[in-house]
Amino acid sequence: MKHAAPLAFLASLLYLSAGPALADMWGYNLRGNDYANLDIRCTFWADTGLKGGSTCLARQCKRLCSSDRRCKAWSSVLIRQGSRSDRIATAHGRCDLKDAVPAAVSAATYVSGIKPGPRTVQRPSAVQRFEPRTNRPGNDYDQVELDGNDPRQCQRLCDEASRCQAWTWVTPGIQGEQARCWLKDAVPSPKTDACCVSGTKR
């Protein structure tokens, strides 16, 4: 019984990771528009592995952005991970706070997010309409090879085409050396796939 209180207190300090928070973009960095780069650390259950460390850092960075009126978006990155005991681990990382929403680029160790608000609900930006790690196979009417590593290029092509209703951007190296953009004249069902980023006009 003498251990009950310390364990309860410790549990209240842990960020338990059942999965990423809604709208968080795993494996993407919102590169640029930083006004603050903060060192952050957190404690989590060791058996959740790297996912646990990335999750608790992302939640901490998201809270920092939510509490700052200037912040519009954020990106967190896991730098190193250590162990305090067999059950408890610590994660050290960086939180980048942004005063605008920049382009999303693939970056395996990052988690990013956009601060919700009236403006983002009324007019979602290209990044906000991203569906990370999502493929929408089918209904293709055109495909284009793209230079660079920015899914917004594909989203922009769809926005500018009256026929286009949805799009899928394929990471460079999967269907060739360059990224590939598939434009669709209907909205096919989404499927989870790390190869791609997708989106719709609706």
Image: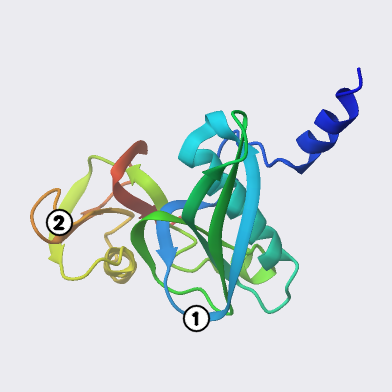
Nearer the observer, 97 or 10: 10
Residue 45 image offset from top left, x and y in percent: 62, 33
Residue 72, quarter of the rendered image:
bottom right
Residue 195 image offset from top left, x and y in percent: 26, 45
* Mark 1 / mark 2, whichever is N-terminal: 1
Nearer the observer, 120 or 140: 120
Residue 54 image offset from top left, x and y in percent: 52, 48
39 lies left or right of 162: right
Residue 53 image offset from top left, x and y in percent: 54, 45
Q: Residues within 10 Å of mark 2 (few under 14, many from 20)?
A: few
23 lies left or right of 130: right
* Helix, strand or loop status at disc 1: loop
Question: Can residue 22 be spotted in the picture?
Answer: no
Question: Can residue 31 be spotted in the picture?
Answer: yes
Farthest residue toward the left?
A: 176
Q: Which quadrant does the N terminus fall into? A: top right
Residue displayed at 64% across by 71% down: 119
* Helix, strand or loop status at disc 2: strand
Q: Which residue is mark 1?
A: 33
Residue 162, quarter of the rendered image:
bottom left
Say whether marks 1 and 2 touch (CB < 8 Å). no
Residue 13's disc number: none
* Mark 1 or 2, closer to the camera: 1
Residue type beneath disc 2: Asp
Residue 104, quarter of the rendered image:
bottom left
Q: Which residue is mark 2?
A: 142
